[in-house]
Image: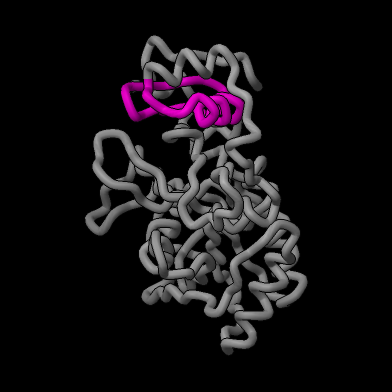
Amino acid sequence: MNPSTCVKSEIIAVPDLPMFQRGDDLPGIIFERACAAGLAFVEHDVVVITQKVVSKVEGRAVRLSEVEPSPEAVELAAEVRKDPRFVELVLRESRGVVAMRPDLLVVETRQGIICANAGIDRSNVEQTGESEWLVLLPADPDASARAIQSRLESLSGIKLAVLIIDTLGRPFREGVIGMAIGVAGMDPLMDMRGQADLFGYVMERTIINRADEIAASASMLMGQTTARLPVVIVRGASYWPGAGSSRSISREPWKDMFRPQGYLRLGKA
């Protein structure tokens, strides 16, 4: 889609979605509920889905009582003042520890995402029994996005893009914001270098993270507490179709001016 042609965008929630469970047909349910609400997909729609429902459907939930903390987790838990079992889960899901202080553990996940607690939490997770259930990030969010995209395109006959998003904090900024952790059907970055602005100045460095822009707009409608709107269609957003991958969003370490010298690698691929 030519990024200069769009003058109107819409953000539309897919209504009446269930509380998703492990093994549910996520794209099938999305398509069925969208059709029931009269929401026919349009070419170049972006289907934005919260990480939590993807993780639930893929069985990425862990009961805290079943986690046995390692000595490393016990030692680290004392420093950050967290449950050693929780810290063990964070370490299992991480390549390395980027920063820590009491009540905060920032890591690089196995997916290459730098975030607090490896994205593990219990918000919007049904709790059964005496022990907490925690939800992990999808093992491969890009693969999850591609599978959902393929099925939705097959059901609808329409070319779509899919984003899996999570709410993450950012360095130097308060508050969390929706960001793309899984991408399919679009290039998440729009390289504007070489294009002229209104006054003929040729852009030299501008690269737009369109996937995160779309994720943030969808997140406004999704909400964080009781909204129950985990799937949103963003219509009319300009982007460049393509295979795409969230891995192109993560800055290479050699480009990163802010990664601490004391970054603790955990020896995981």
Residue at x 57% of width, y 23% of height: 95
Q: Does the magenta stretch include residue 89?
A: yes
Quadrant in which the C terminus is drawn: top right
Residue at x 37% of width, y 22% of height: 80
Q: Does the magenta stretch include residue 24?
A: no
Q: Where are the magenta residues, as a range? A: 80-108
Q: Nearer the viewer, residue 259 or 188?
A: 259
Residue at x 45% of width, y 46% of height: 191
How many numbered marks does the figure carry? 0
Residue 134 visible within the image: no
Q: In which quarter of the image is residue 94?
A: top right
Q: Where is residue 49 in the image (x, y as percent from the top left)?
A: 55, 61
Q: Where is residue 58 in the image (x, y as percent from the top left)?
A: 70, 51
Q: Which residue lies furthest to the front in this view?
A: 130
Q: Position of residue 244 (x, y in %)?
A: 61, 48
Q: Which of 125 and 269 is in front in this view?
A: 125
* 171 in relation to 28, above or below: above
